[in-house]
Image (cartoon, rainbow, N blue to C red):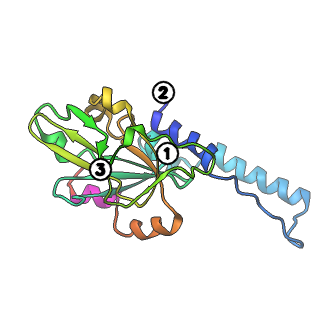
Amino acid sequence: MSDDMVDRTQELEETTVPKNVQNEQEGEKQPIREIADFEDEELHKLLVPDTSQLPLTPPSAVEFNFVSYFAPDFMKPGNDQYIYRHPNGLCVVGLASTHLAFKEKGGITAVDFNVGKSDRSGMKVTGKRKKNAQHFEANTALCKVCTSDDSYIIRCCVKGSLLEVNDRLVKQPELLNSSAEREGYVAIIMPKPADWEKVKASLMSLEEFKKLRALS
């Protein structure tokens, strides 16, 4: 089954992230036979993995395609958010399963992207370099999620360019309750490498987050 979140980060990569061009330097070329032998060895490793190193259960699409980070109690107790970092540098932001909103009866009932000075759902980023993307700070509000008794502000968590928000949540807020870590993601952000390195130090790894929240 395809994953919308994975598909979108890969599609954005094709129009955002330039392909790396490897420059060959003189004196570093290997004989053709040596290269072929190396490639055969690497291919064998991929096709015939060490069974002792295989996990008991196969990784999910998120685990396979992203590195998971978490921002617990982000700016307010109970506001737990995740940041999934893709190899292309894009970050998917959303609500962690431990977010306070999910603990309320009925869960999340509405999502409103009309926060700050503009409606985030109305932003349309175009062009390969995404020059018209808005640049936000880590504490910038992305949207407001509502429950039957309260509301919560969901923030960027990382400094960068907002490429898109998941406007499906406006008509289908139930996606947050059923699939917050997949189809219910909130936004995709492109941070600069230097900005990412700065914020990364303040985030928790998956294992650290599980230990903090006593998750199995």
Element assignment for label 2: loop
Tell me the number on the disc at residue 64.
1
Question: Picture coordinates of residue 53 (x, y %)?
Answer: 50, 52
Count of numbered circles on the image: 3
CA neighbours of label 3 inside 10 A, class few (<14), some (14 to 19), many (20+)? few
For residue 180, which quarter of the picture?
Answer: top left
Question: Picture coordinates of residue 166 (x, y %)?
Answer: 40, 37
Disc 2 to disc 3, how far (Cα)?
A: 36 Å
- Residue tagged 2: 1
Q: In front: mark 2 or mark 3?
A: 3
Element assignment for label 3: loop
Q: Amino acid at mark 3?
A: Gly
Q: Earlier in the sequence, mark 3 or mark 1?
A: 1
Q: Earlier in the sequence, mark 2 or mark 1?
A: 2
Tell me the number on the disc at residue 116.
3
Q: Amino acid at mark 2?
A: Met
Q: In front: mark 3 or mark 1?
A: 3
Q: Majority secondary structure of the magenta segment? A: helix
Residue 87 covered by magenta stretch: no
Question: Picture coordinates of residue 48 (x, y %)?
Answer: 64, 44
Indicate left or right for 36 with 169 as reference: right
Name which residue lies at 53% across and 46% down: 51
For the question of whether residue 59 can be seen, the reply is no
Question: Picture coordinates of residue 137 (x, y %)?
Answer: 37, 61
Q: Amino acid at mark 1?
A: Phe
Disc 3 to disc 1, how far (Cα)?
A: 35 Å
